[in-house]
Image (tube, rainbow, N blue to C red):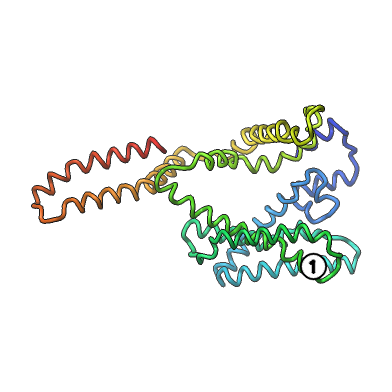
Amino acid sequence: MALFLGMTALTTGIDVTHFFVYDVVMHVLMLHNLDPQTCYSINGVFWTLAVEEQLYLAYFLLLYLRNRWGWGPTLIICGLARVGWFFFCHYVWLATGAGVPVPEAAASHWLTWALGAIAVEAAFGLVQLPKWCRNVWLGSVAVVAASAISVILPLIQKDTFVHDSAWLLMHPAWGFGFFILVNRAVQAEKPWLTTLRRPRLVTGFASLGVFSYSLYLTHELVIMQSWWFTVEWLPPMLNTLLIVTPATIAFAWLFFQFCEKPYMRRTAGADDRSRGQEREAALEPRVLSLKMNAESERTGGRGRRQEQEEEVPLEPRVLALRMNAESEI
């Protein structure tokens, strides 16, 4: 926020009014998504930070509901919270004339937040999901349906049952679709972890994903200031692809290095334990397979002495496998 305010002061100037102070205080308290005048004022993407912080505060309630009734009833309650917030904002508007943001509220996205929590539990084996929760076709249909609703929604007359119903379904459709696609992606990663290999294309995108949150926070600033460094004689599309996009990624990487990464470091002991657990988890299938093959070679009526003789080359093979795997890691 300080970076955006600084750039605003250097370019257009800042007029310190009562609203400006109110706007900054609302952003500091992470409540700016509750007022349509402050929701998109400083940075158009900051409203999602307020939603995120409010959903973190509601995590205690989410875990309480999950532990007491399970994920099924909890998802229903999260969905009802979205509907309830819609009617609450509508009542406030009818009673006072004040507009309360609906799609920017935390209650509107509690259901998709809960789906993300289920996906994490499934990834760690805490819950078992049915196969259709990893069906790419079903997830793609949900994403396409959400995309179609987002395109058609502005064309539908407001304050109608069709418009309101479509809006209520749009964000859950997005969340449900990507919930399935993420589950499928996590399942696809398991063979890569077993073989200690990862496709190069995935590695490249993963390196970008490391600082994707910084990219999300800063991309609007770079785009707004891109008029400083774009080339006038280039077409707009080429300016976007060749200049603005690389500049946006480069600035996000710098922001990540200085403003995000320093707060992500763990202690050396925790890092060593984590790496050791990852090595053991990755080595276990291959070492187990090797030992099973060696045991099958020893069977077939051979004597105890022959088994001991054949056990000698097993250790070097296991040791070599571990050394190769550690070098790959």
x 78%, y 54%: residue: 33
Please, what secondary structure does the residue beneath circle 1 have?
A: helix
Indicate the position of residue 10 as horizontal and vertical percent values: 84, 30
Task: Determine whether 313 is above or below 178 in the image.
Answer: above
Quadrant in which the C terminus is drawn: top left
Q: Is residue 279 visible?
A: yes
Judge the density around disc 1: few (<14), some (14-19), many (≥20) Cα neighbours within 10 Å.
Answer: some
Front residue of 278 and 178: 178
Q: Residue at x 82, y 65 (%)?
A: 89
Q: Is residue 232 left or right of residue 137?
A: right
Q: Which residue is mark 1?
A: 164
- Give the position of the N terminus as an image quadrant: top right
**Who's the residue at 84% across and 54% down the image?**
36
Give the image location of residue 231, x and y in percent: 79, 27
Q: Is residue 88 visible?
A: no
Which residue is nearer to you in this view: 269 or 100? 100
Residue under the image location 46 percent in, 37 percent down: 268
Q: Is residue 189 left or right of residue 326?
A: right
Please state if 291 lies on the left or on the right of 148 as rendered.
left
* Amino acid found under the numbered disc labelled 1: Asp
Q: Quadrant of residue 118?
A: bottom right
Q: Would residue 115 appear left or right of 86 to someone viewing this image? A: left
Whole-percent x, y for residue 262 in the image: 59, 36
Near-viewer residue (326 or 164):
164
| Residue 176 percent across, percent down from the top left | 63, 62
Q: Is residue 55 above or below residue 308?
A: below
Q: Nearer the viewer, residue 89 or 207?
A: 207
